[in-house]
Image (cartoon, rainbow, N blue to C red):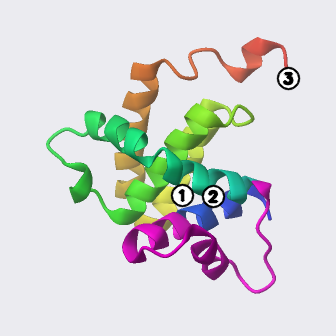
Amino acid sequence: MNRRWARIRAVQALYQVEMTGIEWKLALQSSLDDEEEADDYLYDVIPGVLEVQQAIDAQIAEQLEHWTLERVGNVDRAVMRLAVYEMQHREDIPVNVALNEAINTAKAFGGNEAGKFVNGVLSNLRNEQKWGAKSEYDSGDH
């Protein structure tokens, strides 16, 4: 499974956990197609997001103007939670890649307006936290 599909499956599982309270491994299994198998990425990010969700939610909430986190769509919340987790906890994923993938995932689920909303929130958070201030090309690890 490529990383883009894995992100979509992670968002679906995180959404199910939030909406139904189902255990994350069951949510993951129900989000996979019959021929798909979960990879290490999914076994890291889904429980990882859930473990630090309160801290992630607080960071997202700080960036919302005239909104509350509860008012944000459930899918957009799941997309942003995954992106913030990747930005903070996955050193193998450049910050800008996590941001761009979140925008694309939000667009896939909710259209261009969802992509713009997610972009605004996550870009503000990235700039505030100074994540990705150094490009992955600056490290010499091309």
Residue flagged by tag 2: what amino acid is it?
Arg
Q: Is residue 71 left or right of residue 18?
A: left
Residue 24 lies, in percent from the top left, at 57, 68
- Quadrant location of the C terminus? top right
Name the residue beneath numbered marker 2: 7
Query: Is residue 103 visible from the viewing direction of this image?
Result: no
The label number, if any, that marks residue 105 in the structure image: 1
Closer-to-camera residue (130/16): 16
Which stretch is magenta? 12-40
Q: What's under tag 1, amino acid-wise?
A: Thr
Q: Residues within 10 Å of mark 3 (few under 14, many from 20)?
A: few
- Does the magenta segment cover residue 132? no
Residue at image location 21% in from the left, 58% down from the top: 71
Marks 3 and 1, Cα distance to the nearest angstrom? 26 Å
Q: Is residue 33 magenta?
A: yes
- In primary-sequence order, the first of circles 3 and 1 is 1
Measured as percent of width and height from the top left, residue 127 is found at 43, 22
Quarter of the figure with residue 135: top right
The local secondary structure at tag 1 comes to: helix
| Secondary structure at numbered mark 2 | helix
